[in-house]
Image (cartoon, coloured by chain):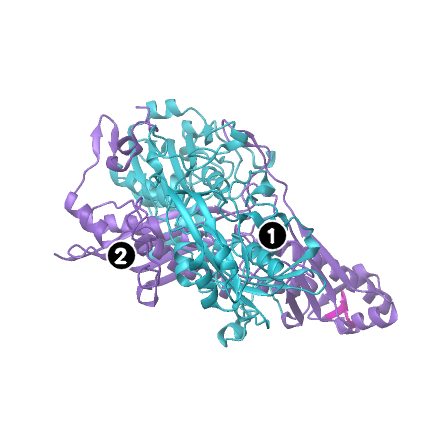
Chain colours: A cyan, B purple
């Protein structure tokens, strides 16, 4: 019996559909305390006073943790890739987004924890907030971040991510038509059925057991160990079965804070975000602003692309520099465009930090470039199947970084789709394959970009 | 006032594994004294089915039934490193690590079976849980007997480890974006067609039908890959016409904090979905697989936007395509500005219109 290729039942399917799968929120440990957070009520402010003494002395409260209790306050989500840290685990002297955690409490029950949060005294000096990425560069824009309003790439050597390929000026000079448009997909929520949840148990041997809904056990292990400044063997992350993630549970949103409260109180603690916290305080998919100008010929060849991308990172960097880089590497979509001029900025705003989500960095550019290609077809009066099939990348064509494609499938998936919807392709389109370009499919403008897949 | 139908298409691509690579996954496997297989890997299953897929790869590679495999990804004490379940990497990268570990286990089983049968291991193969001599199938020993012999007779543990890591590709030229190594592993490809109905009185866009084609490399489990594609289609529909954390973006007000005020797609929004799967194997994924988990919500929004244009003749390029945006676009009936060979859409949205000059988008003309 073959296992690969077989329609075998999902390994944990029966448990899921009969409600017997144990998710984090199903873990029950006697003596567990409830966790709640004091969050910023405003988008941008200096913290002038934080007094948690009334909460600490409240009956039923076992621990309050603020920035002062965190061994390493800032640890970047992408520290492992050399991207510097910028986000404090708990706000210190400034809040940069509504909902940012400032102090956390562990108490006997949920009501007491909420009462303790309400008893904390917080004085804020509100500051102007920035929300429109297009205004982030203006002289009078509020300054959001210690690095300014956009991320300093390559250790501040560059203010943007760039792609340069071919001769963009020649492409625009040679064009019959230049089509320009703006594309702006929205921020959306991951909407997992399971909200951010965590249970931490301090063990008799001094270790901490972390029941986590993380999408990345070892990534979260590393993040918690760094904040706590402990070796990896002091922690055990338990998980591996997640009630919906879609990228939002790559953020290690609750684990470190629960560990700090468990250490301080000596008791097991649990934190389950409410649906409202999940919607309003958890990270979102980024909103993007993209402008494209394509230099095209009357018969539908795309000679060159100029593109500007502003990636709304929210208040901190998290994974956004990674997402923008990936975006830049894929800004030609499924096509071969030999002349490119791409500038992309990770822009800070006073929005909840944005993070990874299904299709990270590319969902946005797929929307922009494909809608743009549909528009070009409409402007030129060229068949939308034809413009896709002729510009489709083929073996030996090169990516925006100059890497030659070994085995692209754009042509087969477009032809199969046409067949699926019953669109009748012209014989010359029906005959197309992903094979290396020649003849009519190798016009002069595509010759210089051809590479050898074996070279890398 | 009428309801109009339209159709649009899109073609997309997506890299498998982390951009620029450098993302390891590891696995280890041990065999119980009765031949049952225990797999330890650190891959979180977020509903993507990685427990199932990795178990199938192990069963296939060793040559034992699927239900002999137990999969444990439950904690960081017993499971080795997996960078995580993201970047469409769970099947492609972590699946390769378990395949490598399973190959070592298979080798060890053959070695011990060779001793038991007094046949060179290279003349043996494993079929359905039995080690058989190639060309002489009457000479055989069950994997359970091999495992028992290893445990009680030879004093050995049948085990194997595997790791998959593609080296990190560095951007060597920040000016051009040139890299020293390919920044991606396999690239997956897909296409999508959308048929929509647009009511020009209410502005409501209904997605009636989505056709989708994916090159998955190899469908390790066709049922699960269809599930990912259909689930992704629904998420893409949400992106296209429903969901928005900031309904008046860039304003940060009027956020929806509950299901009643945030429109996520539900059963009533489901269109007919037709899925076509193509298998063009990758050279470096397990059994030729590619990862399509993430790209599954990338094709629908542009196909829907083009279908809306086909239906009512307006381009809505700020997602989601809500009734309000459709009605405003219909009322404005904006035509692109044409100047020489320039055709300029959406000028009012451009940085050139909104910024005070801090940033410009200049087009060589």
Residue named by callout 1: A224
Circle 2 SS class: strand
Residue A42, x across and y down, in percent: 37, 48
Q: Which mark is residue B264?
A: none
Residue in the image at 28% along x and 34% along y: B354
Outermost residue on the bottom side: it is: A18
Task: Name the chain letter of the residue that bears numbered label 2.
Answer: B
Magenta part mainly helix, strand or loop?
strand
Residue B140 highlighted magenta (yes or no): yes
Q: Can residue A231 be seen in this view?
A: yes
Residue named by callout 2: B196
Residue A82, x across and y down, in percent: 59, 38
Outermost residue on the left side: it is: B1
Magenta residues, start to end = B130-141
Task: Name the chain letter of the residue that bears numbered label 1.
Answer: A
Q: In which quarter of the image is residue B121?
A: bottom right
Circle 1 SS class: helix
Say which quadrant the N terminus of chain A sits in.
bottom right
Left or right: residue B241 compared with residue B153: left
Residue in the image at 47% along x and 54% along y: A248
Separation of residues labelled 2 and 1 (CA atoms): 47 Å
Front residue (pair A171, A299):
A171
Decide: marks 2, 1 in contact (CB < 8 A)? Answer: no
Say which quadrant the C terminus of chain A sits in.
top right
**Residue at mark 2 shares a chain with residue at mark 1:** no
Residue A133, x across and y down, in percent: 36, 38
The 10 Å Cα crowd at callout 1, few under 14, some 14 to 19, many 20 or more, is many
Q: Does B152 sit above or below residue A327?
A: below
Left or right: residue B119 compared with residue A324: right
Q: Does A451 sit above or below residue B221?
A: above
Q: How many labels does the image show?
A: 2
């Amino acid at each position: 019996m073959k296992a690969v290729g077989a329609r075998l039942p999902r390994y944990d399917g029966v448990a899921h559909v009969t409600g017997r799968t144990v998710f984090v929120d199903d873990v029950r440990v006697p003596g567990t305390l409830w966790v709640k957070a004091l969050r910023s009520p405003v988008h941008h402010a200096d913290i002038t006073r934080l007094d948690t003494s009334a909460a600490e002395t409240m009956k039923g409260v076992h621990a309050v943790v603020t920035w002062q209790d965190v061994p390493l306050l800032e640890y970047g989500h992408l520290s492992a890739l050399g991207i510097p840290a910028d986000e404090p685990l708990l706000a210190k002297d400034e809040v940069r987004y509504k909902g940012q955690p400032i102090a956390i409490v562990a108490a006997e029950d949920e009501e007491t924890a909420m009462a303790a949060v309400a008893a904390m005294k917080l004085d804020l000096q509100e500051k102007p907030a920035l929300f429109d990425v297009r205004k982030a560069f203006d002289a009078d824009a509020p300054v959001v971040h210690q690095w300014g309003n956009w991320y300093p790439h390559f250790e501040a050597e560059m203010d943007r991510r760039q792609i340069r390929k071919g001769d963009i000026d020649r492409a625009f000079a040679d064009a019959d038509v230049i089509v320009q448009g703006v594309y702006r997909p929205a921020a959306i929520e991951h909407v997992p059925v399971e909200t951010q949840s965590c249970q931490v148990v301090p063990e008799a041997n001094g270790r901490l057991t972390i029941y986590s809904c993380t999408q990345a056990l070892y990534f979260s292990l590393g993040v918690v160990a760094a904040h706590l400044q402990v070796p990896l063997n002091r922690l055990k992350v338990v998980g591996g079965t997640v009630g919906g993630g879609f990228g939002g549970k790559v953020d290690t949103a609750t684990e470190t804070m629960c560990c700090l409260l468990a250490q301080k109180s000596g008791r097991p603690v649990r934190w389950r975000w409410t649906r409202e916290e999940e919607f309003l305080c958890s990270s979102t998919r980024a909103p993007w602003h993209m402008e494209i100008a394509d230099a095209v010929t009357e018969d539908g060849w795309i000679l060159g692309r100029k593109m500007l991308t502003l990636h709304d990172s929210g208040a901190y960097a998290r994974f956004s520099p990674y997402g923008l880089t990936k975006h830049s590497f894929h800004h030609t979509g499924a096509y071969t465009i030999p002349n490119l001029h791409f500038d992309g900025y990770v822009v800070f705003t006073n929005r909840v930090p944005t993070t990874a989500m299904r299709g990270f960095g590319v969902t946005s550019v797929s929307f922009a470039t494909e809608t743009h290609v549909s528009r070009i077809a409409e402007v030129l009066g060229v068949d939308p199947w034809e413009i896709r099939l002729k510009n489709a990348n083929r073996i030996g064509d090169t990516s925006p970084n100059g890497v030659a494609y070994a085995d692209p499938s754009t042509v087969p998936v477009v032809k199969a789709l046409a067949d699926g919807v019953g669109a009748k392709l012209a014989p010359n389109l029906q005959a197309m394959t992903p094979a290396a370009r020649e003849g009519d499919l190798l016009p002069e403008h595509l010759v210089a970009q051809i590479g050898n897949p074996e070279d890398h | 006032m009428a309801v109009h139908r339209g159709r649009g298409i899109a073609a997309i691509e997506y890299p498998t594994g982390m951009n620029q690579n450098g993302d390891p996954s590891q696995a280890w496997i041990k065999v119980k004294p009765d031949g049952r297989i225990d797999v330890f890997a650190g891959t979180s299953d977020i509903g993507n089915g990685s427990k199932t897929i990795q178990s199938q790869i192990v069963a296939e590679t060793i040559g034992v039934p699927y239900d002999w495999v137990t999969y444990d990804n439950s904690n960081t004490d017993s499971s080795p490193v997996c960078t995580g379940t993201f970047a469409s990497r769970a099947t492609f990268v972590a699946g390769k690590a378990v395949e490598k570990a399973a190959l070592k286990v298979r080798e060890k089983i053959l070695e011990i079976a060779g001793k038991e049968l007094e046949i060179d291991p290279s003349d043996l193969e494993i079929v359905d849980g039995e080690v058989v001599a190639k060309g002489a199938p009457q000479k055989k020993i069950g994997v359970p007997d091999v495992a028992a012999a290893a445990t009680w007779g030879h004093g050995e543990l049948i085990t194997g480890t595997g790791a998959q890591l593609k080296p990190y590709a560095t951007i060597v030229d920040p000016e051009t974006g040139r890299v020293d190594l390919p920044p991606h592993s396999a690239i997956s490809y897909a296409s999508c067609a959308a048929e929509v109905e647009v009511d020009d009185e209410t502005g409501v866009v209904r997605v009636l039908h989505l056709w989708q084609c994916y090159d998955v490399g190899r469908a390790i489990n066709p049922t699960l890959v269809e599930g990912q594609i259909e689930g992704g289609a629904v998420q893409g529909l949400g992106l296209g016409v429903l969901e928005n954390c900031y309904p008046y973006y860039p304003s940060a007000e009027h956020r929806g904090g509950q299901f009643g005020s945030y429109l996520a797609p539900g059963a009533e929004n489901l269109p007919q979905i037709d899925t076509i799967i193509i298998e063009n194997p990758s050279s470096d994924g397990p059994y030729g697989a590619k990862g399509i988990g993430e790209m599954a919500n990338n094709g629908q929004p542009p196909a829907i936007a083009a279908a809306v244009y086909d239906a009512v003749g307006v381009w809505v390029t700020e997602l989601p395509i809500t009734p309000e945006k459709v009605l405003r676009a219909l009322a404005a009936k904006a035509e692109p500005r044409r100047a020489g060979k320039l055709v300029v859409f959406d000028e009012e949205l451009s940085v050139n219109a909104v910024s005070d000059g801090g940033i410009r988008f200049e087009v060589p003309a």
